[in-house]
Image: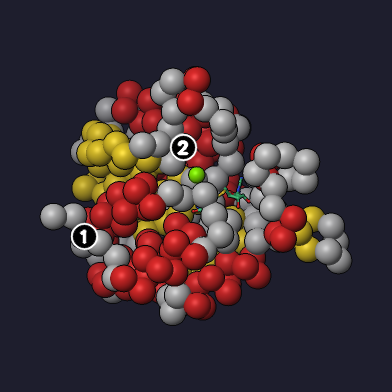
Amino acid sequence: MAAEPAPDVLDAFEAAKGFMPVKEGLALYAAAADAAALGLPLLEVGTYCGRSTILLADAARAAGVSVITVDHHRGSEEQQPGWDYHDPDTVDPEIGRMDTLPTFRRTLHRAGLEDHVIAVVGRSPQVAALWQSPLALVFIDGGHTDEHAGADYEGWAPHVAEGGLLVIHDVFPDPVDEWTGQAPYRIYLRALESGAFTEVSATDSLRVLRRTGAPD
Ligand code: SAH
Ligand code: MG
């Protein structure tokens, strides 16, 4: 049976603001537990308010590794004021821009998982350009344009260690299902076509791929 988060962690996850359904969250947790056994860190692109981070952090805690979570905390295109996925509570009233960092920190504190997470505040490609360590798992859940999803794939997929996992959220092969566009689907196809990754599981829009070939 796949690894599952502790009941208190699951409660914290369900209470957290964000965009990760429970079923996909459980698949993400199982992937994180599998990958963390490599003894290398897990990395997330797209922290938002920490909903998915909680699950990665619990799996990392069990294995004695860290999670790095990257976000500029200013929100994606579809989360800006006037768009469907906007939450007015995420706006910093002093500057009038989104700032999800305070909510993220509260979420992680309440879940008791702060010690297992390193939060990097910045643009994903800028952080990726400095990155040099192998990763057990890369979870791509950031911007949904081709520019952003493509840069996340190009910047982070090469750092997935042999036997490690590349997890992509919001993969919609059928354009009828989409609300975010198909850029995540396109990077999923690129990963498979690269020959470096093999599909392990698909749970709704969450795809888990394992590195079985050389870095591309
Ligand atoms: N994983 C979260 C949801 C992430 S939403 C959950 O489980 O709820 C997508 C996030 O990606 C937003 O917080 C947005 O600020 C961030 N993001 C979008 N493009 C980015 C980029 N280029 N660099 C860093 N963060 C980015
Ligand atoms: Mg998502």
At a point 36% along the width and 74% down the height, the residue shown is 8
Going by the numbered disc 2, the residue's amino acid type is Asp
- Locate the C terminus and report the quarter of the image it occupies: top left
- Given residues 16 and 184, the one toward you in this image is 16
Foreground residue among 174 and 63: 174
Residue occupying the point 24% across, 34% down:
198
- Can the viewer see residue 216? yes
Is 207 in front, or is 133? 207
Identify the colour scheme used.
Answer: secondary structure
Counting residues from the start of the chain, the first of labels 1 and 2 encountered is: 1
Q: Position of residue 105 (x, y in %)?
A: 58, 72
Foreground residue, 108 or 118?
Answer: 108
Q: Secondary structure at mark 2?
A: loop
**The label number, if any, that marks residue 20 in the structure image:** none
Q: Is mark 1 within 8 Å of ligand 1?
A: no
Kindly tell me whether mark 2's CB lies below 8 Å from ligand 2.
Answer: yes
Separation of residues labelled 1 and 2 (CA atoms): 22 Å
Badge 2 is on which residue? 170
Helix or strand or loop: what does disc 1 sit on? loop
Measuring 69% from the left and 47% from the top, which residue is drawn there? 86
Residue under the point 25% across and 39% down: 201
Q: Quadrant of the N terminus?
A: bottom left
Residue 5 lies, in percent from the top left, at 29, 65
Answer with the quarter of the image where residue 7 lies.
Answer: bottom left
Where residue 70 appears, as percent x and y from the top left, is: 54, 57
Name the residue carrying label 1. Answer: 3
Q: Is residue 186 above or below residue 22?
A: above
The answer to whether 88 appears left or right of 3 in the picture is: right
Amino acid type of the residue that numbered disc 1 sits on in the rendered structure = Ala
Q: Residues within 10 Å of mark 1 (few under 14, many from 20)?
A: some
